[in-house]
């Protein structure tokens, strides 16, 4: 029996539901090509950060101002400035190169916290050939003067501004820390998102006791992190309906992990940490495991199994989830010594 792995994500036909989520590997032409050969359905590039674009723009303005003040013939400066390749230009050039090199859709990523002039980059990304855009909403809500409602309205406005700038499919990578995530997810979709990526992983800074400085160390994910996207994919799938794409990211390492998120309704399973640990060829292992499990359990396609275990049948998901919590707490069977 042949097993069909193809799926649809953001309106794109993908040959596999295994997607390489943003990491240094997806931003490198050679490793992106290896991921393609290993069988990924799509590649999401590392994010271009709002701060990088703003820093570049202010640097450009400073240079222009300096030129204007010092020399009457300041227009002579334009050709020189245009030849300076900034972070944004490098990103676009890299996107074009990777696009030419791989056979699968390439999704670009913007990381942002506020609306602003930098949004023009969404359009530039589209013009450079991205098949879709992932907007990574990342903020730490540490301002005591700003309410949850205020911050959420700001985020929806940002999604709408990016939506207005581009016609390509738009996914929004969410933080798991919104208070009422189901309501917020619905607003993001209303704001123009074609899909949601569950979830952004926040990296908590450490403290170096010798230097008393903040130590930023990136940790690869652990298997238990899969539980959060698994739960929320199951809850959101029936609420958002089939027209909205869902991607699960965090803690997916194996074929069985990928099958779990697809079963609860994800369209794609994204992997970063395990590919960083084991290399691009790990994608082949994941897909082989998926095929073997599906054959054994008589599933002929991802389409057939997708969503078969979502919360659609449960009238009140919040009561269901509280019941789960209660039973989980009571499930501890170790010793209390
Ligand atoms: C080294 C590294 C770099 C990453 N860079 C980005 C990035 O630029 N943009 C982004 O949205 N996510 C980024 N991520 C997050 C991953 O795309 C992914 O969502 C997260 O690691 C959870 O998936 P995993 O458990 O498979 O690692 C990065 C993760 C790692 C480990």
Image (cartoon, grey):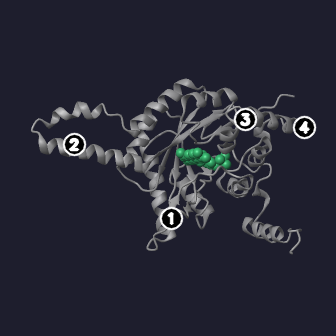
Quarter residue 165 falls in: top left
6 in relation to 204, above or below = above
Q: Quadrant of the N terminus?
A: top right
Quarter residue 323 falls in: bottom right
Q: 295 left or right of 126?
A: right
96 in relation to 68, above or below = above
| Residue on which the image places disc 2 | 64
First in residue order: circle 1 vs circle 2: 2
| Residue on which the image places disc 4 | 296
First in residue order: circle 3 vs circle 2: 2
Q: Is ligand 1 within 8 Å of the beta carbon of the residue shown at mark 2?
A: no
Measured Cα–Cα span from mark 1 to mark 4: 55 Å
| Residue on which the image places disc 1 | 212
Q: Residue at x 55, y 64 (%)?
A: 209
| Residue on which the image places disc 3 | 282
Report the mark closest to the observer, 1 or 4: 1
First in residue order: circle 4 vs circle 3: 3
Report the mark closest to the observer, 4 or 3: 3
Q: Is ligand 1 within 8 Å of the beta carbon of the residue shown at mark 1?
A: no
């Amino acid at each position: 029996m042949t097993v069909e792995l193809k799926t649809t994500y953001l309106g794109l036909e993908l040959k596999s539901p295994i997607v390489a989520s943003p990491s240094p590997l997806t931003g490198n032409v050679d490793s992106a090509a290896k991921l393609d050969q290993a069988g990924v359905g799509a590649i999401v590039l590392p994010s271009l950060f709002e701060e990088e674009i703003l820093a570049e723009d202010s640097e450009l303005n400073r240079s222009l101002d300096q030129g204007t003040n010092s020399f009457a013939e300041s227009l002579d400066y334009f050709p020189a400035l245009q030849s300076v390749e900034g972070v944004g230009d490098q990103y676009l050039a890299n996107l074009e190169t990777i696009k030419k090199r791989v056979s699968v859709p390439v999704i670009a990523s913007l990381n942002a916290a506020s609306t602003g002039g930098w949004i023009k980059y969404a359009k530039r990304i589209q013009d450079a050939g991205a098949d879709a855009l992932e907007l990574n909403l990342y903020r730490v809500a540490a301002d005591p003067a700003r309410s949850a409602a205020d911050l959420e309205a700001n985020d929806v406005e940002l999604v709408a501004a990016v939506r207005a700038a581009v016609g390509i499919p738009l996914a929004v990578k969410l933080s798991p820390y919104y208070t009422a995530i189901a309501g917020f997810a619905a607003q993001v979709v209303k704001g123009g998102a074609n899909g949601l990526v569950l979830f952004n992983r926040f990296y908590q800074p450490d403290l170096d006791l010798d230097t008393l400085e903040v130590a930023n160390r990136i940790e690869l994910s652990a298997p238990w992190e899969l539980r959060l996207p698994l739960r929320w994919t199951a809850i959101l799938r029936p609420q958002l309906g089939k027209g909205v794409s869902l991607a699960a990211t965090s803690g997916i390492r194996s074929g069985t992990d990928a099958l779990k998120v697809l079963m609860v309704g994800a369209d794609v399973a994204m992997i970063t940490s395990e590919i960083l640990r084991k290399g691009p060829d790990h994608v082949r292992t994941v897909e082989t495991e998926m095929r073997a499990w599906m054959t054994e359990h008589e599933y002929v396609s991802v389409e057939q199994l997708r969503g078969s275990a979502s919360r659609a049948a449960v009238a009140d998901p919040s009561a269901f989830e509280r019941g789960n919590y209660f039973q989980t707490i009571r499930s501890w069977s170790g010793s209390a010594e």
